[in-house]
Image: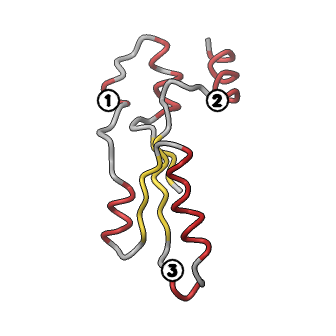
Amino acid sequence: MVWNDAAYGAEVNLYGLKGLAQGPMRIPEVDFAGLGAAVGAEGVVVRTPEDLEALVRWAARPAAERPFLVLDLRISGDVVAPYQEEIIRVNS
C-alpha cells in the first residue's frame, strides 16, 4: 500500500503553516499502481471505498495465482492526522 497525498505531507503541515513556500513540498501525482504493474504486480488506484473491491477479488484468488498487489491509495492532503496536529502545536 502506498498512501499517496502527492506531497511531503508532514512538511506541508509543519513548514507550510509557518509560511514557507509549499511548492517544493508538493510532488506531481505519481502513479504507483502503474509502477507496480510495470514490474509484474497488479496495480490498483484507490480513490473511493468501492475501488477496494479489487483487493477483495485479489484476496479471493489462490495465492499461487495472484501477483503482488500495489494499492495506490489517493488520500487528501487537506486532512491532518492528530499526531501531526500535536507536532504542529508543540512547534508553534
Left or right of residue 4: residue 60: right
1 or 2: tag closer to the N-terminus: 1
Label 1 element class:
helix
The quarter of the picture where the C terminus appears is top right
Residue at image location 51% in from the left, 80% down from the top: 66
- Give residue 66's mark: 3
User: Residue 81 shows which numbered tag?
Assistant: 2
Image point (45%, 52%), residue name: 72
Q: Amino acid at mark 2?
A: Ala
Q: CA distance from mark 1 to mark 2?
A: 21 Å
Find residue 22 and report its horizontal and vertical position in percent.
36, 22
User: How would you rate the neighbour count of disc 1 (Cα within 10 Å): few for under 14, some for 14-19, many for 20 or more?
Assistant: few
At label 1, which amino acid type do we have? Answer: Pro
- Alpha-carbon distance for marks 2 and 3? 33 Å
- First along the sequence among labels 2 and 3: 3
Q: Amino acid at mark 3?
A: Arg
Q: How is the image coloured?
A: secondary structure
